[in-house]
Image (cartoon, rainbow, N blue to C red):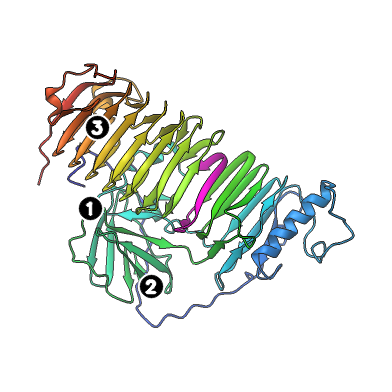
Amino acid sequence: MSKYNHFESKCRRGCKPQKCYCKPKKCKRRIVWPPDNPDEEQNHVHAPTHIYVPGTFKNFDQAVAAVDWVQNVHDQVPGYDPDESCDYSERISYNPMGYVIHLAPTQDHVGSIDMSNDVSYLRVEGDVSPVKGVGYFHGLANWGDYTDFSEEYNVCIGGAGVFSLNVDCDTITVEGCPSPNYNSLKCGDKLTFFHKNGKTTKHTVKCAEDNSITVYDSIPICKCVQMGEGFVIRPNVNLKMCPKNGCKNQKFQIEHRMEFAGLNLTLNSRLIWGANAGHTDLSYSVVDGKCGSLVQVGKMDWNVPNTFLTNMTINSGSHGTAMLQTFVGCNANLVAQSNPPTQFWFGVFVRNQTSVNLINDAHIDTFSSDFYGSATASHVQAGSKHAISKCRFIDCAVGTYAEQNSHFSALPMFGTSENNINDMAVQFINNELAIKLDTNSHHAMEKIYVVGNTVDLEIDGVIYADINTYASASTGVKNSVSYYSIALTVIVPP
């Protein structure tokens, strides 16, 4: 258990071990594509049409154009002549249940066209595995309560934090509660390791057994992995979203339900993605792109992990639930503006410039999330609200910063028993400035732990190096207030 975790956690489910043997032989991978013996009933009227790329169509753009064409012909959209099939009607037909586009791992796929129509359901599927897209970071991932709320993510395979990592030359071993099981990994799978100095190294899997992974080259790190260092195993299907018209934005939206699963997704521009009047699901994916960002449209139903190495934005009207999301690096952050209350529970934010940025009356709840090593962990502005029950803010320059009539809160979620109050407490550990409030902003906590911060509290420009020198609920010169029932300075165990 991490030395920063002052709560007793228990493994709540037993997982049967899956036995296999790591055989570090020469990598030989045979990929059959399209898959052998596809389900003969998969294309009937009560299920989505399954499209294989390559196979049904040569590339991803052709598959998207075909789905767009058959839907618009059905909707009798002007300009879509049913007699001008462009070879689409010979391969797929209109299906009211929607479509699944399966992308082969044998090539890099590119999406260069926009999509926006009334398709009922569209799923783009690559390499779906419970261990792909999961952020495994040492000392982080406060996921003990996840299975109380959802069981879509298989913790017996993917594992659950708090994670403990050990690196021995070319072998990584991960312990959790429960520990992950990597037996499904194949030689040739890729992983990216994130080091404390901000650098990354890329590695190729040689073999895996139980909770250990062996790669072909040594990982440049000592056995003692430091907090905030870790890795993500990338899906072996690459999809690059790159608009060919040179526009700054690319639109990929349907009307009802959009799903991306098991993708190593690279964004070369701003991708406005989702469902205008429905739901989205992103799962087991890595979202990357220094010049790109993801703008979420619709209601999120995200209950399994993804890792973001770039920006994600939630605009007004978009909301929902996103659990177990990891944001890594200075290009990665979560931005929300004018959105209804949205759950981003069990998040992991590592070395971001601003991990969470809320503006213009935004509402986010990051219950049981970890913030480590960021310049600013959370910045809320212009009437925004951030609920932070059971969150941990560790080694950040600024932990929480509220200004312009904004608000942080962490009252107990499930009653006011002593155990629940202790369990919901917020931890501020080894930050340069733990809590900052300015201009009619507020901090409402029941119980907080403040440990080793250079400055515990700043209210309207007045600095309190020790929070105990500030009287709870005292109003600052610009009407800002920090409220807490119990503030404890805790001696961190060695």
Mark 3 belongs to which amino acid?
Answer: Ile
Say left or right for 270 vs 72.
left
**Magenta stretch prevailing secondary structure:** strand
Residue 101, percent across and down? 64, 59
Q: Is residue 208 above or below residue 50?
A: below
> Mark on residue 435?
3
Q: Residues within 10 Å of mark 2 (few under 14, many from 20)?
A: some
Task: Using the rendered view, name the quadrant where residue 490 is placed.
Answer: top left
Q: Which residues are magenta?
A: 283-302
Percent position of residue 312, x then y = 47, 47
For badge 2, the amino acid type reads: Thr
- Tell me if residue 72 comes above or below residue 386 in the rendering: below
Q: Secondary structure at mark 1?
A: loop
**Quarter occupied by residue 40:** bottom right
Numbered disc in front, either 3 or 2: 3
Q: Report crowding for label 1: few under 14, some 14 to 19, many 20 or more residues within 10 A (C-alpha).
A: many
Quadrant in the picture for residue 22: bottom left
Cα distance in 3D space between marks 1 and 2: 23 Å
Pointers 3 and 1 in contact (C-beta within 8 Å): no
The residue where tag 2 is placed is 204
Q: Is residue 179 left or right of residue 104?
A: left
Q: Earlier in the sequence, mark 3 or mark 2?
A: 2
Residue 468 part of the magenta-drawn span: no
Q: CA gap, disc 3 to disc 1? A: 22 Å
On the image, numbered disc 1 is attached to which residue? 227
Which one is in front, 450 or 121?
450
Q: Which residue sits furthest bottom?
A: 26
Q: CA distance from mark 3 to mark 2?
A: 41 Å
- Horizontal side of residue 257 vs 314, given as left or right: right
Name the element at disc 2.
strand
